[in-house]
Image: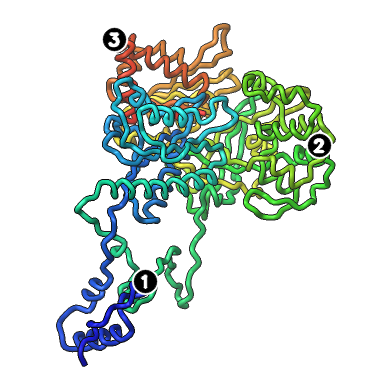
Amino acid sequence: MSAPFSQRPVPFLPESAPFSEEQRQWLNGFLAGLFSTSTVDPAALREHAAAPALAAPPVPMLVLFGSQTGNAEGLAKKIKADAEKRGGFAPRLLDMAKYDPATLPDEGNLLIVTSTWGEGDPPDNAAGFLEKLQAEDHPRLEKLRYSVLALGDKNYEDFCGCGKKFDARLEALGARRIYPRQDCDTDYDAPAKEWLEAVLPLLAKADAAEKQETPTTAVGHHDEGAHMDPGAADLVAAGQPVRSQLVPTQPANGNGASVPAAPVYSRTNPFPARLLATRKLTLEGSDKDTRHYEICLKDSGLAYEVGDALGLVPMNSPHLVQEIIEALGFSGDEEVTSHDGKQTSFRDALLHDFQIRTPHKEFLTALAQRDESDAFLKDLLNPNVRTELDQYLYGREIIDFLLASPKLGYTPGEFVKLLRKQQPRLYSIASSLKAHPEQVHLTVDTLRYEAHGRKRHGVSSTFLADHVTESTPLPVFIQVAKHFRLPEDRTKPVIMVGPGTGIAPFRAFLQERHATGASGGNWLFFGAQKSATDYFYREELEALQAGGCLSRLDLAFSRDQAEKIYVQTRMKENAAELWRWLEEGAHFYVCGDAKRMAKDVDDTLHAVIREAGGHSDDGAKEYVQAMKKNKRYQRDVY
C-alpha cells in the first residue's frame, strides 16, 4: 500500500492532528513496524511529535512594586504568575529599590503596583525610585507603555497618593498609558483582578500591532511543550486535546486511596487558631491597657520569620451589632447576601462580614441622598471642605448617623450593600519560632475612649481583650514582610527604635539573635509614658541585658519628668556612639507610629549623620538613601 500523503491534508484544528483518518491509520501501522524492527527510541519520537509549533515571541513586561507591608509585593507576584500562566508574556518582577529608572527608555511595557504610606508618601523601597523619576533631567519615555495599580486607604486624605504620583510623572515623561490607573481601597482583591484582566489583553494587542509595523526576521519558539504532562505527545499524535492538570495530585495512602490535600491557610483562608495565654503589660495607674497574647499555631502549617506580621480577622462587638439592628428596626434574623455571595442572617453578617464602625464617604453620600433634609451632611460632603469633614467625623461612627436619622427606611439587603468588607488587622509578631515553636505572640494596645457622649472601642483590640477565650477561634494568617528582616550576617550590629507597642518585633529580633548566637551588638531604644506602669517586658529585657545579648538599652519615659523625653531625645544624646555603630555597618530599624514618631526619628537620624558624621544636608540624605538601598534602614510603621 502506498503512503496516502498525495491527498490534500485536512485543515488543522487545535483539537486534532493535521492528518486525515486514512493518513493516521497508515502512520500507526508504519510506526508500529518501525518500533518492532528499529533501534529508534519511541520516547524520542513522541517528544518530536509533541514539539510545539512556532509562535510569536512573548510580550516583554516589567512589573515593579513599591511595598511597605507586603500587600503590593504579593499582588505583583500574582500578576507575574498570572501572565506566565496565560502564556504569550515574558514578565520580569523587580523591587523598585533594585531598579534604576534611567533604564526605563529601554523597556517596552511597564506595570507598577504600589501602596501609599502615610499622607501620600511612597513606601520605603519606592522612595528612591520616585525621586529619580521626578528628576528634571530624567530621559523621555515615548516608547514605554504603562499602567498603575495603586493601593491605599480611603480614610486618608491623599488616597492612593503614591500611585497617582507615579501615574502623573510617567505621563509627563511621554509614556503611553495603556489602561487607566486603578485605585484600590483596603479591599483590593476584586478591583486588582479587574485591572489585570483588562491590562494584559491590551498589552498583547499593542505589542502585536507594533510588531506588524516593525517586522522581524527572527521567530521565537513557544516553550509550553517543555511543561507537557506525560502522555501529552501521544494525545497530540492521536489528535486528542491536551488539558493541563491545575490541581496537584496527592500520593496515595497504603490502601491505594487518594489522600486529601492538607488545607493551605492564607489571607483568603485563615487558620482558626486558639488563644494560649494573655497578660496585661501595663500596671495599675497606667493610662493605657496594653496586653501580651500567645496564640497556638499547631497543625496550621503556618511558619513565619521575625519581622513578619500576623493577620487577624476580628469579630465585631455583639453589643454594637445589636444597637445597629435596633436602630434600623430589624430583628437580626433577616436573610442577606455577604461579600462572598453567601446567604446569611443580618446579625451574622454584621458580626463577621462587614465593617460597621467607620463611616466612609460612599456611605455618607448614600445617607445624604436618602435623607433630603440633611443639608448639613450634604455641605460636608463637598470635596472643597475635606478638612471640615474629617474633623466632624473624628470619633463618630455609623451608629451615630443611624440614631440621628431613625426613619431612613433601608431594608437589610440595602443596608449591607452600603458597608465595606471586614478587613484583617495586621500586628507585628513579637516572638521567634526558635524560642517559641508553634506559637505566635502579639503586643496590642486595647483601644477605648469616649467621644460625642458615647464610649468607643477598637474593633480588633477589644475583640481580643473582651471576647476571646481559649475556645474562641481566631482566624489568622501570616503576612510576610520581606522589607523588615534581620541582617543575614549575624556579626552585623543592630539598632532598634521601638516605643510603645513598637517594641513587638524587636522582642522577636532579640529572641532570634539569642537563639542563633548572633555575635553582632544589639542596641534598643524603648519609650513609653511612665516607667512605673508602662515598661513592657522589663524582666525579659533586663535578663537579656545581663546575659550580654542586649548590648545597650536606652529608655525614654516621657512623663517621668517635667520635660518630655522621647526615643529621638536619647538618640541625640548618644549621637557619637550611634554614628560609630552606623559606620561599623549597623542595621537601623524603626517600628511604631508613622505620622509623628517615625518622622521624628528619621529627622534625628539625619541630624546624627550631619553632626556626628560631619556630613552636609545632601550628604546625610545620600548616606540614608544608601542605607535604605542596602537594606540597612528598615521601618515597620503604621
Q: Please tell me the numbered disc located at residue 408.
A: 2
Q: Is residue 554 left or right of residue 340?
A: left
Residue behind mark 1: 13
Q: Residue at x 30, y 73 (%)?
A: 233
Residue behind mark 3: 614
Q: Earlier in the sequence, mark 3 or mark 2?
A: 2
Q: Secondary structure at mark 3?
A: loop
Q: Earlier in the sequence, mark 1 or mark 2?
A: 1
Viewer-proximal residue, 332 or 585? 332
Question: How packed is label 2: few (under 14 Cα within 10 Å), some, or many (20 or more)?
Answer: few
Whether residue 217 appears in this view of the structure is yes
Instruction: Give coordinates of residue 523: x percent, y percent.
Output: 39, 24
Q: Secondary structure at mark 2?
A: loop
Q: Which amino acid type is marked by label 3?
A: Gly
Whether residue 546 appears in this view of the structure is no
Viewer-proximal residue, 2 or 596? 2
Q: Give the distance between the C-alpha atoms of the residues marked 3 and 2, in whole angstroms.
A: 65 Å
Instruction: Give coordinates of residue 626: x percent, y percent.
Output: 30, 24
